[in-house]
């Protein structure tokens, strides 16, 4: 029975060491980049691009008429332009954040988590309005939702890990710097 619990505790140990590194693991973080979180954030950008392509490859724009309405406006062209602009700017900003996440930047970890929430919430705006107007098929909507959800979840996980690991690294560097200052003071008194 103890052997059955052993793989579970090993997994918990690895996950705990990943999110809350201590000792030599934090020392190694000084010299290694945040590869997993960087890769996850790049995968979230790829998922966002695929969801974006699904949205616009299967949407019938002509014949929208008065059935489409978002925030009281029935002009589909304006909303499409706004959505495309938001998606392009989001992808560019996510690429910038991904590069900063690679260096354990805690602020960018928070920004990545914010974008994760935004990626999940934006499903309920423009795409659902298109679906309710009959301009998007059910299968395209499901595909787009899955890719946007995947993007959001990857961003949330990468952001949480970056925040946790970045704070551990900052605390370690503060402690190490304080020790270095004390040893320098002692060396100067001799």
Image (spheres, grey):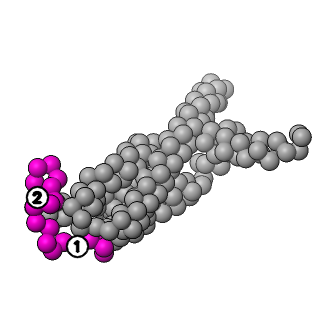
Residue at 47% x, 57% y is 150
Q: Is residue 121 left or right of residue 168?
A: left
Where residue 178 appears, as percent x and y from the top left, is: 57, 29
Mark number displayed over residue 60: 1
Q: Which residues are magenta?
A: 56-75
Mark number displayed over residue 142: none
Magenta segment: does it hold 64?
yes
- Sequence-wise, the earlier of marks 1 and 2 is 1
Q: Is residue 190 left or right of residue 122?
A: right
Mark 1 to mark 2 CA distance (whole Å): 15 Å
Q: Nearer the viewer, residue 90 or 150?
A: 150
From the image, which quarter does the C terminus lie in?
Answer: top right
Where residue 72 appears, as percent x and y from the top left, is: 11, 49
* Secondary structure mainly formed by the magenta segment: loop
Q: Nearer the viewer, residue 51 or 145?
A: 145
The quarter of the displayed image where residue 143 is located: bottom left
Residue at 57% x, 57% y is 36
Where residue 156 appears, as percent x and y from the top left, is: 46, 47
Res. 164 visible in picture: yes
Q: How many neighbours does mark 2 have within 10 angstroms: few (below 14), some (14-19), or many (20 or more)?
A: some
From the image, which quarter does the N terminus lie in?
Answer: top right
Is 108 placed above or below 135 here?
above
The quarter of the displayed image where residue 181 is located: top right
Residue at 73% x, 42% y is 13
Q: Nearer the viewer, residue 118 or 63?
A: 63
Magenta segment: does it hold 14?
no
Q: Secondary structure at mark 2?
A: loop
Residue at the spot of label 2: 74
Residue at 41% x, 42% y is 110
């Amino acid at each position: 029975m103890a052997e059955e619990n052993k793989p579970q505790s090993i997994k918990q140990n690895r996950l705990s060491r990943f999110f809350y590194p201590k000792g030599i693991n934090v020392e190694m973080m000084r010299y290694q980049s945040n590869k997993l979180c960087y890769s996850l954030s790049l995968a979230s950008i790829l998922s966002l691009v695929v969801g974006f392509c699904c949205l616009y490859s299967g949407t019938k724009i002509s014949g929208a008429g008065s059935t489409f309405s978002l925030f009281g406006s029935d002009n589909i062209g304006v909303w499409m332009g706004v959505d495309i602009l938001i998606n392009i700017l989001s992808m560019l900003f996510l690429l910038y954040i991904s590069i900063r996440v690679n260096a354990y930047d805690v602020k960018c970890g928070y920004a990545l988590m914010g974008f994760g929430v935004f990626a999940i919430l934006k499903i309920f705006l423009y795409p659902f309005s298109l679906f309710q107007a009959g301009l998007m098929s059910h299968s395209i909507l499901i595909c787009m939702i899955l890719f946007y959800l995947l993007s959001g979840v990857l961003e949330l996980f990468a952001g949480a890990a970056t925040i946790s690991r970045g704070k551990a690294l900052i605390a370690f560097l503060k402690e190490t710097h304080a020790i270095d200052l004390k040893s320098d003071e002692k060396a100067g008194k001799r």
